[in-house]
Amino acid sequence: MDKINDRKKGIVSSGKFILASASPRRIEFLKHTGLRFEVIPSCVNETYMNGETPQGHVLRLSEAKAQAIAGRYPDAWVLGADTIVIIRSEILGKPRTSAEAKEMLGKLSGQEHRVFTGFTIIRQTTGTLVRKIVESLVIFKEIPENELAWYIRSDEPYDKAGGYAVQGMGALFIREIHGSYTNVVGLPVCEVMEVLKSIGAIEFPK
């Protein structure tokens, strides 16, 4: 078994490990574990399909992202993930303009919303495919106009589902989180590591 380790106390993988995402948040979380991995983003169409549930959406996309890379590296462990923000059955994507960011954050202001992340782990040579969904509930305070204007002038809202970063300045708006914090950031680390350990993809050095 080819065990790969990034540093002395890092988590050990039982083969090449690939993150099928360019998300800086997901990359940072995996780096914290000491796991050695490669980043190979997949170019998957993330369009929402008619009649698709939020859970079905994130599972489908996480698997599609992982499969796109696993087909090229069949002996590697491949992790794909997708995160969405839902309020009153509406999916909030990533705002492209300040007007879109203002509209999204206005919807979240003073309300609770849900964050879903679907993740898929694949290793084709062993026939391994595991999918899981993690859900968190987030409650926002009422956002004053001057704070909203200040926030959307920053760069932070524009590559984040829902238009905010819980790990950044967006924390100013959050009263409560029920469930996984890292899930709200974009990768439920506890659940991902539990699955990786259970299928023999990683082990913790003694």
Image: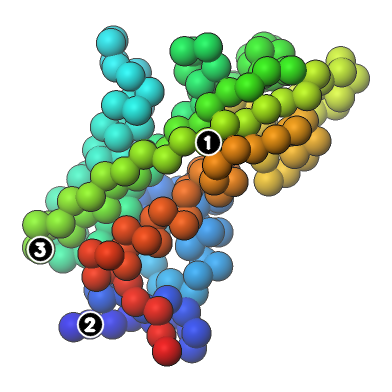
**At x 34% / y 77%, what residue is drawn?**
203
Question: Left or right: where does residue 10 sit relative to residue 155?
Answer: left
Q: Is residue 66 visible?
A: no
Callout 2: helix, strand or loop?
loop
Callout 1: helix, strand or loop?
strand
Find out whether the residues at labels 2 and 1 contact each other: C-beta distance under 8 Å: no
Q: Quadrant of residue 47?
A: top left
- Which residue bears the numbered disc 1? 136
User: Could you tell which of marks 2 and 3 lies nearer the N-terminus?
Assistant: 2
**Percent position (x, y) of residue 20?**
34, 50
* 153 relative to 82, above or below: above
User: Could you tell which of marks 1 and 3 lies nearer the N-terminus?
Assistant: 3
**At x 72% / y 44%, what residue is drawn?**
168
Question: Mark 1, residues whose alpha carbon is within 10 Å: few (<14), some, or many (≥20)?
Answer: some
In the image, 185 versus 152, the foreground residue is: 185
Disc 1 from disc 3: Cα separation: 32 Å
Say which amino acid is labelled 2: Asp
- Which residue bears the numbered disc 2? 2
**At x 86% / y 15%, what residue is drawn?**
145
